[in-house]
Amino acid sequence: PTRLGIDSSISPEAFRKAVVKMGQKTLSTKIKKLGYINCDIAYQHPLRAVMLQGVVLDASRNPLTGIQLWSVGRDYRGRCSDMTKEEGKFLAMIAQFDSDVDVEVHLHRSAKGDERLALYFENHLDWCELVDKETKEVMRKVGGNYKKGFEELVWYADVVDSKSQVAWIPERRQWQHTIDGKLVFLREAEDESGGPFCEAGWRMAPSFAVGLKTPIPPPIYARPTVVHTQTFGPFKTGPPGKFVDVGVLVLT
């Protein structure tokens, strides 16, 4: 069949007439920008990207360093990330040109209350491959989320049949972490106030450490982290290849 080109600049009536004609048809038009963004555009086509700049402060107007940020398109699909640096500044967060964008600020905070307990190892690769299979299996049950039970000062691993728990033992003045009834980690304390949430003071139980060739540092016992998101905008980005200052973003 004959190929018939249809230019988008023609009138609606002419367009309808062209469509009903016989033959294969094509439609061509000039697109200023697509409805999405390539997050690598700044590296592939530096002059096509817009870079957002600004400062993030807390409610007391103190600068926040190491905070996760996202530019989120309002009139296009796509989001690009950045992180605040010294003095709470971000200097080159990618966004689409000639567009409306929001800036999302993701702040990690510890959850309130004592209903949940989160355990995790730091630098576990330092010892994970050096311990025997049995010890590794026990350590596998240590990390994760724990939920406070009906008993006032006992937290149970939030996994079915895990048999891992953290409890206050008043007669010994200790917080004890047991797995399958075996004492694995402990922390001495004057009383139960403050709960098990403490990065310091925990140590491996001597009874469990017997025979271990590689010492295992205790995990971190902390409240779970909750991500709070606050959105600022919309901001207009302007022409490609430019820096856009979105000003000071103060969290509430």
Image (cartoon, rainbow, N blue to C red):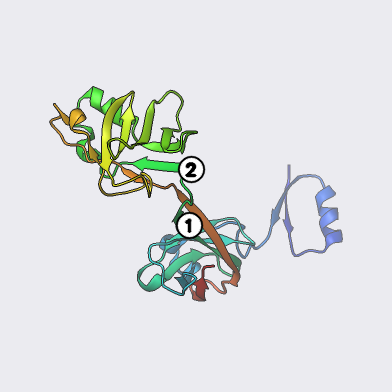
Image quadrant occupied by the N terminus: top right
Mark closer to the observer (1, 2) = 2
Marks 1/2 in contact by CB < 8 Å: the verdict is: no
Measured as percent of width and height from the top left, residue 151 is found at 46, 34
- Quadrant of the image containing the C terminus: bottom right
Look at 65% across and 63% down and name the residue there. Answer: 30
Which mark, residue 115?
Answer: 2
- Kind of residue at badge 2: Glu
* Direction from residue 138 to residue 58 in the image, left or right: right
Q: Residue at x 75, y 65 (%)?
A: 9
The quarter of the picture where residue 27 lies is bottom right
- Mark 1 closeness class: few <14, some 14–19, many ≥20 residues within 10 Å: some
Which residue is nearer to you in this view: 27 or 210? Answer: 210
The residue lying toward the viewer, choosing from 104 and 109, is 109
Give the SS element for disc 2. loop
Residue 118, quarter of picture = top left
**Residue occupied by mark 1:** 39
Q: Amino acid at mark 1?
A: Cys
Return the residue nearer the eye: 79 or 190.
190
Residue 109, placed above or below residue 247: above
